[in-house]
Amino acid sequence: MPDAARAFFRRALHLATWVLGAVTLLAGCASQRPPVTGGTPAVSCNELAAQFSWPGLRIGSAEPVPDGAVKVPGIAQPMPAHCVVKGAMNERAGPVDGKPYAIGFEMRLPTAWNGRFFYQANGGLDGFVTPAYGDILGGGPPTNGLLQGFAVISSDAGHAFDRSTPIGGGSFGLDPQARRDYGYNAVAQLTPMAKALVARYYGKAPMRSYLVGTSNGGRHGFVTASRLPDAYDGILATAPGFNLPRAAVAQVWGAQQLAPLAHKSDKTGLLDLTTAVPPASVALVAQAVLRRCDALDGLADGWIGDLVACQRAFDVRRDVPSCAGAATQDCLPAAQKEALARMFAGPHTAGGEAVYAPMAWDPGVAGKGWAQWKQEYSVGPRDAVALAYVFTTPPASPEVVTGRGSTLIDFALGFDLTRDLPRIRATEGRYTESAMGFMTPPDPLMKDFIDHGGKLLVAHGSADPVFSPLDTIAWYERLRAARGEQLGDSVRLFLIPGMNHSRGGPAADQVDLLGALVRWVEQGQAPASVVAAARGPASNAPNPELPPSWSPTRTRLLCPYPQVARYRSGDPERADSFVCTAPGP
């Protein structure tokens, strides 16, 4: 090539590189939204009810709350000055039971607003308007959304707990619209109204919107990402019950595995499932899991850092010593081990199809929350009620708990997979949507939410007795198969060893996931790890289940799945002694 041509080529290449860089820079600037700025009220709290209207809305009250007038248990700093708004949407009479229904809500609007909107998705069967303080989740959080300046809404998801009937929290399942409101419509109705009310109060719309919830609230997060893909910039979901009807089936099926070993209560005359596998027996299993799995993450510290590897390594039949007679502190009878093995494997249809994911072996099974859910709530006013009246079509007759000597435990122990499982997918007459239709995300891969730029941060306790972390892992793997390695730009999953349902258990469960989500959404800092702390006696909310061998100030590194936190060097009680690595073989 002649020198002149070579020089021209170099100049042309330099110019093209400069132009490409300038275009890239401009495109990057165009894609960045302005930083979040807050504000103060543009109208008075007392006047807000008169100055704001919305179709189907009735504001019952709007009252100012002085700075420091409200204290929240476990949080040292009192709540800031704010306006508390209470109201209802879509008030009506139920066509089936004639009872009044509405989507009840509460909003708390801080005087010093940070420019952000926070939807507090509550849990269980809802039915209560929990104060809208903005729970940031985990065990004993030392702060909340309201204290940080978020405008927060909370709701009852479209129904009030009915104290006049033994059905209690499940009575709304007789009303088709209340089912839809609980499943997805309450969030869909409240979100635009709440954002508009925020805009009226402050004179500007929220610059960022977040939905935060655990358990059924985590399910609300998954469903909202699927149904309202552009409504929220970031969603934080812990212990997400996105497969709730099937999980409820697994709960009652698990109770059926324990029932043959249980004794009747002298007080009630009913089977007491806590006698099937007593706490001492479960603790023996937990110790066996530790012996087999504790060092898989590089350190024997009473904490299973590599949950997936532990599922491959542990076998309850092989690794728990057997007794010829009754259980002792060193062994279990074969019948107890077999019942636990079946329970953890989960229900299967007659054709061998898994109804729900297996439960995970983790030392957190010795937690009090694990026993409550598996041996009490599964046959009582949680899973059995939900399954009888909300998750099956048609809903069960109220006589399940009110007539002919029937009880919820009878319903739970009599639930037959062949006969009754199809009812969670059934429709009938005025019940035009099945439980699997109104309770689960229509698109569990959340394509539109991810394509819109939404960020989903998920955390799950390894010893959750209600919603299996293995089910959440399986969901994440399906998502990763569809999205590839780019998935980490939009969705991240963190497992919290030892943690029971949403909090508690022998775990370091105090972690600032909301802060991690906000930095991800607003600064582009995807969480490469987060630090979790144990709640020792000096903490703001002590956890009595911490093992005595742990430091009361223990911290642990949590890594995005599938990475595992492995011990590197230094103080084994500190998170900075660990590093995130690829999973083991």
Image (cartoon, rainbow, N blue to C red):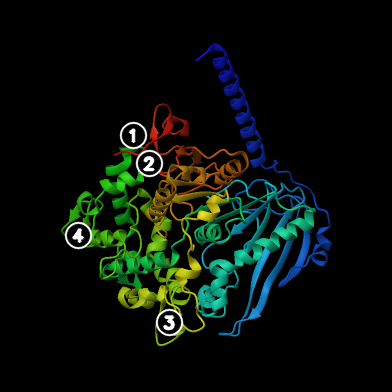
Identified at 47% across, 43% down, the residue is 486
Say which label, 1 or 4, has the lower sequence index: 1
Dot 1 amino acid type: Gly
Q: Label 4: how many residues lie within 10 Å, few (<14), some (14-19) or many (20+)?
A: some
> Which amino acid type is shown beneath numbered disc 4?
Ala
Mark 1 lies on a secondary structure that is loop
**Pointer 2 or 1: first along the chain:** 1
**Looking at the image, is mark 2 or mark 3 earlier in the sequence?**
2
Q: Earlier in the sequence, mark 3 or mark 4?
A: 4
Per the image, the residue denoted by label 2 is 305
User: Label 4, label 2: how many angstroms apart (C-alpha)?
Assistant: 29 Å
- In the image, is 324 to the left or to the right of 344? left
Decide: is 520 above or below 100: above
| Residue 270, visible in the rendered structure | no
- Residue 298 got which mark? 1
Q: How far, Cα to Cα, is label 2 from label 3?
A: 43 Å
- Residue 14 vertical position relative to residue 509 in the rendered view, above or below: above
Q: CA distance from mark 3 to mark 4?
A: 34 Å
Task: Please identify the residue farthest to the top as the structure is shown.
Answer: 3
Q: Residue beneath label 3, please?
A: 400
Where is residue 282, by image quadrant?
A: bottom left
Residue 245, quarter of the rendered image? bottom left
Residue position marked by numbered label 4 in the rendering? 334
> Secondary structure beneath disc 2?
loop
Question: Upstream in the sequence, badge 3 or badge 1?
Answer: 1
Q: Spatial distance from mark 3 to mark 1, Cα to Cα?
A: 51 Å
Q: Amino acid at mark 2?
A: Gly
Does dot 4 land on a helix, a strand or a loop? helix
Neighbor class of circle 1 (other Cα within 10 Å; few <14, some 14-19, many 20+) is some
Measure the alpha-carbon separation of dots 2 and 1.
Answer: 9 Å
